[in-house]
Amino acid sequence: MKSKNSFLMTPIDWLLLISLSILWGGSFFFNRIAVTELPPFVIVTSRVSIGSVFLLFFVHVKKQKLPRSIGIWSQLIFMGLVNNVIPFSLIVWGQTSIASGLASILNATTPLFTILIAHLFTPDEKITIHKAIGLIVGFIGVFLVIGPTALSIADITPQLAVLTATCSYAIAGVFGRRFHTLGLDPLVTATGQVISSTAILVPITLLTNYSFLRQATTSLPVFGSLIGLGLFSTAIAYTIYFLLLSRVGATNLLLVTFLIPITAMVLGVAFFNERIVTRQVIGMLIVFTGIIASNRRCHHQE
C-alpha cells in the first residue's frame, strides 16, 4: 500500500487533473451542441462508438489483451450499463431542457450518492456521523440548486434525470471496485465497458431512431462535437483518469468533482450565453462543502 506521501500531487499531476476536468466538463459543452440536431440515443451511441475505437487503439499500443472470460465480460456489460448507457443517456436528455452549467452542478453530486450506495451494498463503508452531516449539507445544496423549479413537474424532470444519472454513476463506482481484484489493467476495464456500452446502445438506437438515421444529415459543428465526446471526453479522459488514479489515489482524484462544473459553466457562458444563477452557485458551494465533510479522513486512513 502506498504511503500518504506517495500520493502528494506534483505539478504534472495538477496539470493532468485540470486537463481531466476540462475534458469531462467539455462533455456538457459538446452535448449542448449535439442536442440541437440529434436525438439523445444517437449522441450517446456515437460517443461510445467513437470512444471504443480510440480505446481499442490505446490497448493495442500498450500491447494489452481484452479478457476472454464470459464471467468478466458479464461484469463489464453491467459496468457499461450503469457507468455509460444509463447516465450518458439521462444527462444528454436532460440537456435538451436545462443549461450545461446546471447539469454539471447536479452531476457533481455523484460522491454523495456513492456514500449512500456504498453504505447499502458494502460491509466496510457504512455511514458515519461526519458522513451523515456531509450528506445532509450536500443535499441542502442540491435543493437550493434545483430551487423553485421543484414546484413544476415539467421543469424539475430534466434535473431529476441528471440526478438519476449520478445515482447510476454511484452504483458503477461501488461495483467497479471489484475489477481491481480481477487483475485487469484499468485501461482494459475502461475499454471493455465502453465496448459493452456500444453493443447495448447500437440496437436500441437503430430500433428507436431508424427513420431519423436514414435521412439524417449532420452539420460540421455537431459532427465535431461527436468526435469531441468520443475522443476527448471518453477515450482520452478515461486514460488520464486511470493514470491519475494510480499516481495520486482516489481521494485526491475527487478534486476533479469540484473543477468540472467550473469548466462547464465557463463554456456555457462563453458560447451559449447561459446565465450563472447566484442561487445555483451558492448551492454548488454547499454541495462541495458536504462532499468535503463526508470524505474527511484521518491521516492514518489515507
Image (cartoon, rainbow, N blue to C red):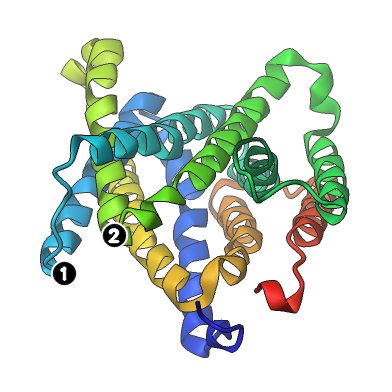
Residue 85, above or below 212: below
Determine the CA span between mark 1 and mark 2: 9 Å
Q: Nearer the viewer, residue 180 or 215?
A: 180
Quick check: marks 1 and 2 in contact, CB under 8 Å? yes
- Residue 267: % across, % down: 55, 56
Q: Secondary structure at mark 1?
A: loop
184 or 256: nearer the viewer: 184
* Total numbered labels: 2
Which numbered disc, 1 or 2, marks the residue that appears first in the sequence? 1
Residue at image position (71%, 21%) is 155
Residue 99, picture quadrant: top right
- Can residue 51 be seen here? The reply is yes
- Tell me the quarter of the picture where residue 74 sits: top left
Q: Is residue 212 above or below residue 79?
A: above
**What residue sits 53% from the left and 28% below the top?**
96
Q: Position of residue 275 (x, y in %)?
A: 71, 46
Image quadrant of residue 3?
A: bottom right
Residue 295 vs residue 300, the one in the foreground: 300
Q: Residue at x 32, y 52 (%)?
A: 190
Write down the residue under mark 1.
Answer: 62
Is any part of residue 212 visible from this angle?
A: no
Residue kind at label 1, given as amino acid type: Lys
Quick check: 104 left or right of 70?
right
Helix or strand or loop: what does disc 2 sit on?
helix
Name the residue type under label 2: Leu
Q: Residue at x 37, y 32 (%)?
A: 78
Q: Residues within 10 Å of mark 1 (few under 14, many from 20)?
A: few
Quarter the C terminus occupies: bottom right
Q: Which residue is mark 2?
A: 187
